[in-house]
Amino acid sequence: MGLEKPDDAGVYRLTNEIALIQTVDFFTPIVDDPYTFGLIAAANALSDVYAMGGAPLCAMNIVCFPIGKLDIDILREILRGGLAKLREADTVLAGGHSIDDAELKFGLSVTGVVHPDRVLMNRGARPGDHLVLTKPLGTGIIATAVKAEEASEEAQKAAIETMTTLNRRPAEIMRPFSVHACTDITGFGLIGHACEMVEGSELTFVLDSTAIPLMPGVLSYAEAGFLPGGLHRNRAYRETMVEYGARVPLPVRDALFDPQTSGGLMIAVPDSESERLVNALRSAGVADATIVGLVERGKVAKVRIE
């Protein structure tokens, strides 16, 4: 699996029992604290491996740092945060590469493994499936409110806790279930990734806007206009594939397009197993795990928000 399908990671079969998962992600700081930034960047990079049904093995740091402009202790703290999150994921840091750059950026290239017969793709959902989401939405909107010094401590704490939480437990818990498709919700927002999951099919994802978990304050911040640029780009790119119910307010629509950092997994699973999966996730501490929609057969690929 590679460039022919827009999936979360590349997969290379080594043997009949082992396939490699390869992914890379890095970005500019989204929080002020460098250690926390390292935690978030590592959790985000690891997420694609979990979304493919695999387990990460090792990683390589990617660093762009403005030498002479920022204190080197900032970089040490970022790397320390990244290493701490890798250790939590039982993933080895094998090295990395750094360059002198005008803008600070950090991330990782991650290699994982999965059985070739158990690779999860973002496409493959079937009519009748339920859609399970494992984390609340709102990191992009809250980050924009933070820049305007309008975000509450509660909202900031919730966003950081979400972004630094690994998708490891959901990935482990869903393995015994009959998962048909899976993706992690990141930069394209919930609607954008839902559109990827149905694109090229005759499926409709029906999302219940009242069931989708949101972080504290997200709707009020959206209503006040604290919308990141990526949200507008996501809407412009995918709006033609989306239908809205008459009672879905604009702030909710904004939240569903909000670009996420280190977001949760969205899992398509048979309706007969969905409640059991959610109960297993919640029992393991994945408190926001929720059935947020279902899959219907349709003439064209689309996402309907009700």
Image: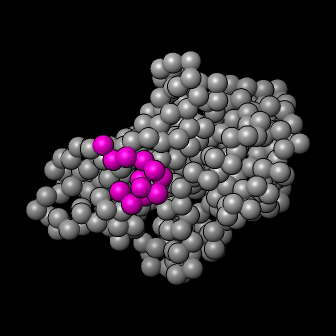
| Residue located 67% across and 64% down the image | 285
Residue 259 visible to the viewer: no
Q: Is residue 87 magenta?
A: yes
Q: Would residue 71 be found to the left or right of residue 166 on screen?
A: left
* Figure disc tally: 0
Q: State whether residue 16 is above or below residue 147.
A: above
Task: Give percent across and percent down for residue 41.
Answer: 41, 55
Q: Would residue 264 be found to the left or right of residue 228 on screen?
A: right
Q: Would residue 97 be found to the left or right of residue 16 on screen?
A: left
Task: Give percent across and percent down for residue 244.
Answer: 78, 50
Task: Give percent across and percent down for residue 305.
Answer: 78, 50
Residue 13 visible to the viewer: yes
Q: State whether residue 157 is above or below residue 16.
A: below
Q: State whether residue 138 is above or below residue 49.
A: below
Q: State whether residue 79 is above or below residue 194.
A: below
Judging depth in this view, the residue of 193 and 1 nearest the camera is: 1
Judging depth in this view, the residue of 28 and 275 nearest the camera is: 275
| Residue located 83% across and 39% down the image | 270
The residue segment tinted magenta is 83-94
Task: Give percent across and percent down for residue 8.
Answer: 53, 36
Colour theme: one colour
Judging depth in this view, the residue of 296 and 92 nearest the camera is: 92
| Residue located 51% across and 18% down the image | 15
| Residue located 80% across and 31% down the image | 126
Residue sitting at the far bottom: 153
Residue sitting at the far left: 68
Q: Would residue 137 be found to the left or right of residue 212 on screen?
A: left
Q: Is residue 156 magenta?
A: no
